Amino acid sequence: MAANSAAAKQDKVFVGHLADMSGPTAFVGKEYADGVRDAMAYINANGGIKGTGLEFETIDYAYKVPQAIASYKKWKSRKKMVAMQGWGTADTEALISFVARDKIPVYSASYSGHLTDPKGKNPHTKKPAPYNFFYGASYSDSCRALVQWAAKDWKTKGSKGKPKFTHIGANHPFPNAPKAACAEYATELGFDVQPSVVISMKPGDFKAQCLSLKSSGTHYGYIGNLGGSVMSLIKSCNTVGTDIQFMSNIWGGDRKIFEAIGEGVKDYIFPTMTPFWDSNVDGMKLVKNISKMSDSSGTKSRPHHYIRGVCSAYYMKEAMEWAKDNGGITGKNVKKGMYATQNWVPKGLEGVCLPATWKDDDHRGIAEVNIYKGNFDKGNVSIEQVDTVSLERRADWLGY
Amino acid sequence: MSTSVTMRPCGDFRTSYKQDTTIFETKTIRWFAILAIAFACFAPFILDAYYLTLFIQVSYLGIAALGLNILVGFTGQISLGHGAFFGFGAFASAWLNTQFNIPVVFCIPLAGFLTMAVGMMFGMPAARIKGLYLAIATLAAQFIIEDFFGRAEWFSGGAAGSLAEPINIFGFAFDTDESFYYVALFALVFMFIWGCNLMRTRDGRAFVAVRDHYLSAEIMGVKLNKYRLLSFGISSFYAGIGGALYAHYLGYVSAEGFTIFMSIQFLAMVIIGGLGSIKGTLMGVVFMVLLPEAMEASVSVIKDTSIGAHPMLVDGLAYIKEMAIGLVIILFLIFEPEGLAHRWNQIKNYWKSYPFAY
């Protein structure tokens, strides 16, 4: 009887899923959440975690921290949550202490650099985040990769003198996350770093800011915002007539944005952590099957944010499988499962998720950044890969 | 039954001002309040972390909302920057603790005083302007302080946020929901009793006089500038205490949360609860904290049914929830503009004269 109930307990494990589908970051939040949700439903429909079902609940917390905390507590105390799929910077950071104490791994879509330091080794790290994981390079690392690309681009074009680099974004933790780290590296590579230009996260008329970009003679501008704000910036700067090479963070560039902006998009540079929907790689077959969980016709084309959500869920899945074989699916074991393999791609997602390595003192899973160029040409969006940057795992970059 | 639970019994006359300004209307209500608090002390033994966290939220938001009600409901001023003051309290407490090694129990009231100073600074225009003009001035406070959080790395940690140690008294850390619950309960009861008492003092009556008719108040000798500014100070003090509790509960403060939306949420709390009512403030906060949770629970019920899996509904549910919250607030403003406190009084009056309305 006791054995039976123990087996029944292991029959299902609970994973909480926080998503922003109606709040300020819903523009990309919904796509990412769909990816996580479909992947978990697909895992369930195909044998679960080696026979253990994945019970999950998606809560749209609309980017409100108190609701995120309440949901977390509900899941922890009532559902015996073993892991959580999270979302934004505000909620991920608010939960750092709780998840560390409760030993619940969180897979978020906040790529803040300081989440990568589980032991607080770097003096820049405010708070060690031992139970936080994310799939992808941190905002700081992505920005460093873009700066590397920019340095190469400057040379390739045969330009003379010091290129000028400017950070563009709202004065908020999300756009600011890589600002200092990226500026430091840009200076190291010989850029002349300009004072950052502040534009609101909400769409608006940014001609004044574009004029100051023009007058400072910025060559490379890193955009820290997303969605509507990026659209407004490009439109405003086209009107003003700036000659800037725009580069954005991972949320600031996708097909949907380029289609919305239309003719204004020219050689827009952005990083990704996965290939695109129409890429011819082995793993995309599994992604397309997963997509059918919420789109049975299979006609919907998903952005790279969706695919990143799938990767996030699948790394968790494989860590859970390891945990099941090594003492049971508990938060602590799932965390250990994340360190069990190195240079690791979840089965079936070859070519989609990049090989990742997490260590108990270094949560920089990915140190590779694929860089793409987007163009809008006579009604068509064209996106092509222009570079792959492999970043060093420098000790002074950990958690920064 | 000779005594009643909710109202003053027949023959209970008040013959002095002192009797007329008691916190609790009847002895029975007072005993009920004391019993409720005594029972509340046992809550962590019965309730799980989810309920406790909801209570903790009610407590830190309630303290801040009471501050806003003192300003808006009792003094007749307006503030659209309360969320920023709440955030300032959170950062100030964390900053005092990490920079000067002051124990957290002292940082919380000190953060209240620092926020009070900032609040009074931004409240200064209140001496000369009122109404919409004042609203815009306080809106500026919201944006200035928010921007300050982003820039002042020495104070707020900038983009990386700020660390807030748990409250530690004689080596016992209040870092679990169960232990922090008692901190929250104490703070809530203390600050609300203080709020009640404040309204019974000379200063409290001066606030109400300023609200009801500033010209008459001035003729009576109430110094308008002093009381308007004081009201801003007290309001910010409450916001600071609420924010500091929030910081030390989470252990981490990030500037992202303290936006204009938070300020509007505080306003919604006091309007729904009842302007110029202390118990109404608490009712409004409870309502605003529980509403999204209740909506989430009811949406989950639809999700579990056979129609819940329909793709259109799956996508729509998120919006249904948000829209319903908005709708409830609008309905409140239309049908119950005087707030929950007023409705509560009406229910009491109904039972008082039941079954004869007259």
Image (cartoon, coloured by chain):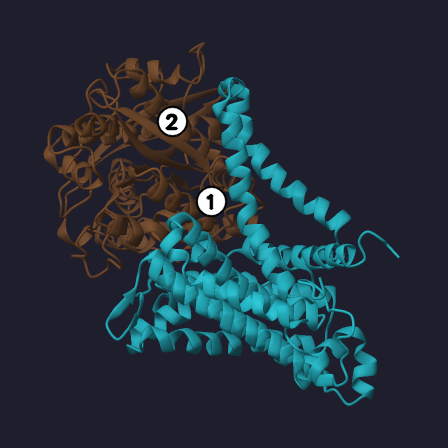
Chain colours: A brown, B cyan
- Mark 1 falls on what kind of element? loop
Q: What residue sits right under mark 1 in the picture?
A: A63
Image spot of residue B349 (x, y percent): 77, 59
Check the residue under mark 1 and report the chain it is in. A
Residue drawn at x 46%, y 67% is B88
Residue drawn at x 30%, y 61% is B175
**Residue A282 sits in which quadrant?**
top left
Image spot of residue A55 (x, y percent): 34, 28
Give the number of the disc on residue A151: none
- Look at the image and tell me in which quarter the C terminus of chain B lies: bottom right
Side of A20 relative to B103 (left or right):
right
Mark 2 nearby-residue class (10 Å; few <14, some 14–19, many ≥20): many
Specify whether residue A108 is in view. yes
Check the residue under mark 2 and report the chain it is in. A
Mark 2 vs mark 1: which is more N-terminal? 2
Closer to the camera, A198 or A344? A344
Image spot of residue A226 (x, y percent): 45, 40
Q: What residue sits right under mark 2 in the picture?
A: A37
Alpha carbon distance from label 2 to label 1: 18 Å
Closer to the camera, A21 or A231? A21
Q: Which residue is at the far top? A: A297
Q: Which residue is at the far bottom? A: B221
**Residue B262 sits in which quadrant?**
bottom right
Instruction: Indicate the amino acid at tag 1.
Output: Tyr
- Mark 2 falls on what kind of element? helix
Instruction: Indicate the amino acid at tag 2.
Output: Arg
Side of A88 relative to B240 (left or right):
left
- Residue B102, compared with residue B326, is above or below; it is below
